Amino acid sequence: MAFELPIQVFWEDTDAGGIVYHANYLRFFERARTSWLRSLGIGQQSLRQRTGGMFVVCGCTLQYLRPARIDDELIASATLQALGRVQLTLAQQVRRRNPDGSCDTLCEATVRLGWVDATTLRPARMPQNLIEKLRS
């Protein structure tokens, strides 16, 4: 099941033509991932302090399908696709909510997150209780 986060497009998100700047989709995806983790009771700062580990993006592919524009109402989503001991993969989308309630997919991404030791930044095994929370 996908976690969804509503996002309003502001002037600061766009270029001079009122089109969302391509790199801002990465910001929208990050907000959705962070909010998804929070919805599971996982705060990244407290997780780092408690476990000494943290998530880092280790791979990302994006496909831009349609442009978002200023004042659009967007939905950024995150769906867990795969979960291992050191890495997880998320499918993410940004969709535009239309006035009739339908949605158009604007951008799709596959994002790989690795678990690393926060001090050395070397790959490490995720704590088992974290894996169980992510599976819920």
Image (cartoon, grey):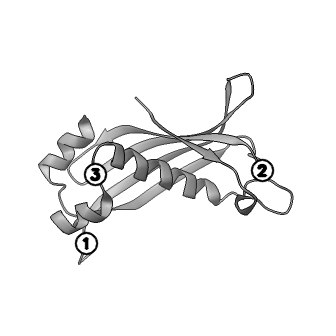
In the rendered image, residue 135, in percent from the top left (x then y), is placed at: 25, 36
Task: Give the numbered dot on residue 48.
Answer: none
Q: What kind of residue is marked 3? A: Ile
Q: What kind of residue is marked 2? A: Ile
* Mark 1 element type: loop
Mark 1 or mark 3, earlier in chain: 3
Viewer-nearest of labels 1 and 3? 3
The answer to whether marks 1 and 3 mark residues whose Cβ atoms lie closer than 8 Å is no
Q: How busy is the neighbourhood of tag 2: few (under 14 within 10 Å), some, or many (20 plus)? A: some
Quickly name the residue at label 3. Answer: 42
Q: Is residue 132 left or right of residue 62?
A: left
**Residue at image location 86% in from the left, 57% down from the top:** 17
As drawn, 59 above or below 109: below
Q: Nearer the viewer, residue 73 or 87?
A: 73
Q: Nearer the viewer, residue 114 or 72?
A: 72
Figure quadrant of residue 89: top left
Q: CA gap, disc 2 to disc 1? A: 37 Å
Q: What kind of residue is marked 1? A: Ala
Quickly name the residue at label 1. Answer: 118
Figure quadrant of residue 47: bottom left
In the rendered image, residue 91, in percent from the top left (x then y), is placed at: 46, 40
Mark 3 or mark 2, earlier in chain: 3
Quickly name the residue at label 2. Answer: 70
* Mark 3 element type: loop
